[in-house]
Image (spheres, grey):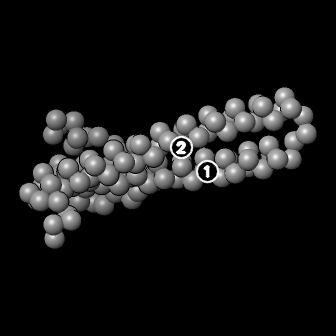
Amino acid sequence: MKKLNKSRQVRGGMYWPKWYKTGSDYTKIDLQLWDIRLVLEDLKSRLVFSHLRLKHAVLVMSSKQEKAELRFQKRILDEHIKQIDKLLEENEYLKRDNFKKEYGETYYDF
């Protein structure tokens, strides 16, 4: 596992420090979890903006068929936002668990 993580290239929007390759596995996991969180929050903000646009479009459209199609798209977006919220919760749980494994206690205990 360590050999795989040593050569693994991380994708995302975060800057990876020079000490990333020499850091502990827990530190690497923590940085990757932060990167995942940032990507998910960015995606959620984009979807929320699209959701608002669809909501406005439903109010403006006059055709019943177009309104029905837009409402269906809005429902799909709602489901995607719920899934992203669930992933953010799981990511937070993993961050806490990783911290607890590294330091023996949660960061809420400090």
* Residue in the foreground of this view, choosing between 18 and 98: 98
Q: How many marks?
A: 2
Identify the residue at horizontal 28%, vertical 49% (top origin): 93
Q: Residue 10 in the image: x percent, y percent?
A: 35, 45
Q: Residue 57 in the image: x percent, y percent?
A: 80, 45
**88 vs 66: above or below:** below
Q: Looking at this view, name the residue that lies furthest to the right.
A: 62
Q: Which residue is mark 1?
A: 48
* 10 Å crowding of disc 1: few (<14), some (14-19), many (20+): some
Q: Looking at this view, name the residue that lies furthest to the left.
A: 104
Can see residue 23?
Answer: no
Q: CA distance from mark 1 to mark 2?
A: 8 Å
Identify the residue at horizontal 78%, vertical 50% (top origin): 56
Tell me which label, 1 or 2, sits earlier in the chain. Answer: 1
Give yes or no for contact between labels 1 and 2 (Cβ–Cβ under 8 Å).
Answer: yes
Identify the residue at horizontal 50%, vertical 42% (top origin): 82
Tell me: 3 left or right of 77.
left
Residue 105 disc label: none
Q: Residue 79 in the image: x percent, y percent?
A: 55, 37
| Disc 1, SS | helix
Identify the residue at horizontal 44%, vertical 54% (top origin): 38
Q: Residue 72 in the image: x percent, y percent?
A: 69, 32
Q: Which residue is mark 2?
A: 81
- Say what amino acid the circle numbered 1 marks: Val
Image quadrant containing the N terminus? top left
**83 vs 98: above or below:** above
Tell me: 38 left or right of 75.
left
| Disc 2, SS | helix
Image quadrant containing the C terminus? bottom left
**18 vs 36: above or below:** below
- Say what amino acid the circle numbered 2 marks: Ile
* 10 Å crowding of disc 2: few (<14), some (14-19), many (20+): some
